[in-house]
Image (tube, rainbow, N blue to C red):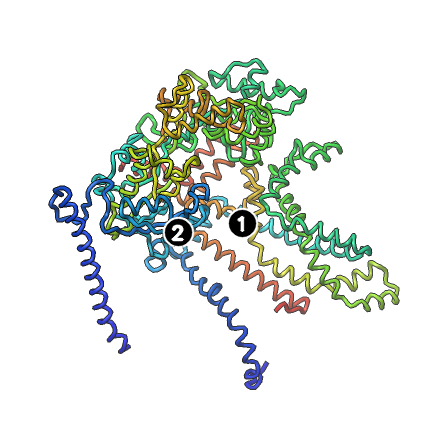
Amino acid sequence: MKSKNRKFPVMAAALVLSIAFSGCSNNGGNNSTADKEANAAPAPATANAEVQGGPLTKYDPPITLTSTMNETGKETLAEGDTHANNVWTRGYEDELGIKVTYDWIVADANYNDKMNVTLASGDLPDVLKVNMVQFEQLYKAGMLQDLTEVYDQYASDLVKEYYSEEDGAALKPVTKDGKKYAMVSYGGSLDSSDMVWIRKDWLDKLGLAEPKSMQDIIKIAEAFAFNDPDGNGKKDTYGISLSKDLPINGFLLGYHAYLETWIKNDQGEIVNGTIQPEVKEGLAELQRLYKEGVIDPEFGVKDFAKQMEDVNAGKAGMFFLPQWAPFQVKDMIKKDPTVNWVPYPVQSIDDQPAKTQNHLSLGGVFAVRKGYEHPEALIKLLNFQAEKMFGESAATERAKYLNGDTGLGFQNAVVSNLPPNKNVKAQDEVEQALKTGDTSKMGLEAKLFYDDIQAYRGGDLDKWHMERIFGPLSSQGVIKYYRDNDLIVMNEFIYAPTKTMNSKSATLDKLRSETFVKIIYGSLPVDDFDKFVTNWKKLGGDEITKEVNEVVKGQ
Amino acid sequence: MHFNPRQFMRNIPLHLMILPALLLIIIFSYIPMAGLVIAFQDFSPISGFRDMTWTGLENFRYLFDLPGFRQVVWNTVIISVLKIIAGLTIPVIAALLLNEVRANGFKRSIQTIIYMPHFFSWVILGGIIVDVLSPSSGIVNMLLKSLGIQPIQFLADNNWFRYVLVITDQWKEFGFGTIIYLAALTSIDQSLYEASIIDGAGRWKQTWHITLPGIRPIMILMLTLSLGNVLNGGFDQVFNLYNPLVYESGDILDTMIYRIGLQEAQYSVSTALGLIKSVVSFVFIGLGYYLAYRFAKYRIF
């Protein structure tokens, strides 16, 4: 005990000294930069040593910044580059004076687990690339730096422009009491739009017109099941393909039912779309169609992969998936070029227009550890990435940073944020270019899409999916139709899950999928939907609704 | 049993040799047990163990209050008990039958073939089984149809689902059990058979009085060990085969906790469930050990 007591003051002294020294070196560093700036331009004489000029001003001497990284694959890296040392890290150091090092680099699939371990260890990197749940934990533990000021001061116009889209939705989930605690990667919400995919070649064969209403959709589905669209004389096709995960949004939207979406009702209260009476109407119709044999009779035991197997085997003529669906059926076209999947907007059962329901999903949350001396460095890194890809220097340097034709190099930026909803904008450019033949005004990415579509039209069936995602008749075209005609219902709840959501949603999800699949199978009557609503409310739904209203109104 | 200092001294090198293994077990098995405290806390990985609020039995209460928890426990127990029974009989029968096969090449190839599914993952088998049992195109239902029986949706029917789980589980694993019992059979003293033949025992009598008693210790060992699995229904299998239609007969503890855990990393609740399962398994293994000793005079360890 004695020796311990004697040691303590020594240690304390050492600690004090080290703090004093680090304080000195900090001041030294800042002073010298301040001197430089004073020489270059009359810098505002401020006591705040953190002020470091504009969005892309270089640190001198260089600073260090630690973060973490997921493996992005070797096709994203130029010859000889590694995840730890590549065109991005060199760019940061040469042009920004930020030496970025990674505490660890792991496979994408393990990133989340590794981050959980890191958070638990307490040894945090300077820039924390986390998910929404981890962000919430860090915020509650008071371990995050408030970025409001450095964002306002340092963010480039380009970065600010991206974050201001869709009414500034991107940064809302990471804003607490008006303060921004993180930056995000936000791709926009438009790509989450629902749509109806129909085999146009079957439509033509059966002499049916394109759908203009929900009634048409139902008639088409029935014809696909009963009128032998594949012409083999057997009743071996069905109208609607589903899986046990119930991808029925594209159908229910025709009844103005918004599954798993928080919507505002007439009284201004936010309610969950899942328990609204419109869902019951849609389920009743699905039950009828299942009984008739229009829906795959075995969908209840099939997962998504199995469902897509059937679709690719030519068994179904209709399914409901977002804009990326062509990737799922592209092999079909390679085998039989007459197959023609075409996306249509959701259709309405009555005189009210049908709308899609969209969700905000963040690709990543970038926060700064409390106590890091250069929180503005995060903003500068984002400025840098936006500048190299979309700014003035993009014309000459973009290809270098994107690793040439692969276009995937941006994944190696320590933090990155792409312009929201860039796909629909690219579709716009592609459609114009296809009409006029003038490719001079196209963005680099749109030009790549355009070339792919030209290749498809020249006979390269491998590129068919590009035609259906970005061509004139494509999923992004459908999204453009939604956008331009104001046919989007946005999920009102864009924040981290509430307390009761965490503890009760698994139960509620089970209740929903069990009830809905059974209703469609006909083993429960449609009226059991009312029982489901009562149970849903009782088992935590009411509590969650209350919390959601509090969160949304508190913003 | 008495402590003998001289013997102990003589064995010191042996004791030292076991030390590394012991250390590993202490470090990786015993010390982490302290982590079980988070079952009684409201744990957040960021604040760590120390700053946690104690919640007593709150997490256990949460588990037991989950709607349908009883049903899920019941499903788990009934599925695993069925599996234990099947796992004890089918491999023994298969081993006895294989033991009677004289042609060595034939015996070996059968053994390899039935052992093979053991190496497939349930992810792959799940897809195959969905196809095989499909009411419209699966081979099982085509056979039934040719016998004039209406197609059955095996995977969507609560009356069938548990049996499908047990049968497919055995189809995958009985080859493995068979190998263990075949090994046990080779250890039976051949002179016993010769003596019984002289006494006029036929094949049945030999099996009943020599073979089965001969492999009884292994059977008891396997039974006792499998008792520890009473609260394990087989996550991989159920997860790849179940669907909303058969939640009421097929949802087990592990799949439920997977869905809850997946929602938002509820470490404390998962740990609480793990603790319950461990305690129950421990009790069952202890009980099995006692019964094995009491009735079969067999000590496993």
Chain bearing mark 2: A
Residue at horizontal 55%, vertical 53%? Answer: B231
Residue at horizontal 66%, vertical 21%? Answer: A232
User: Measured from the top left, where is residue A540 in percent x and y?
Assistant: 40, 40
Q: Work out whether residue B226 or residue A98 is closer to the camera in this orientation and state it.
A: A98
Q: Using the image, determine if residue A107 lies above or below residue B275.
A: above
User: Measured from the top left, where is residue A206 in percent x and y?
Assistant: 58, 15
State how far apart marks 1 and 2 are (Cα).
Answer: 30 Å
Residue type for callout 2: Asn
- Residue A470: tell me if it is visible: yes
Q: Using the image, determine if residue A361 lies above or below residue A37.
A: above
Chain bearing mark 1: B
User: Measured from the top left, where is residue A51 in percent x and y?
Assistant: 18, 45
User: Measured from the top left, where is residue B79 in percent x and y?
Assistant: 60, 49
**Dot 2 corresponds to which residue?**
A116
Query: Quarter holding the C terminus of chain A?
Result: top left
Quadrant in the rendering for residue A339: top right
Residue type for callout 1: Val
Q: Work out whether residue A47 or residue B183 is closer to the camera in this orientation and state it.
A: A47
**Dot 1 corresponds to which residue?**
B73
Neighbor class of circle 2 (other Cα within 10 Å; few <14, some 14-19, many 20+) is some
Q: Work out whether residue B180 or residue B294 is closer to the camera in this orientation and state it.
A: B180
Residue at horizontal 60%, vertical 37%? Answer: B156
Residue A331 disc label:
none
Q: In the rendered picture of this protein, how many numbered marks are placed on residues?
A: 2
Closest to the camera, between mark 1 and mark 2, is 2
> Regarding mark 2 in the picture, which secondary structure is present there?
helix
Q: Is residue A273 left or right of residue A204?
A: left
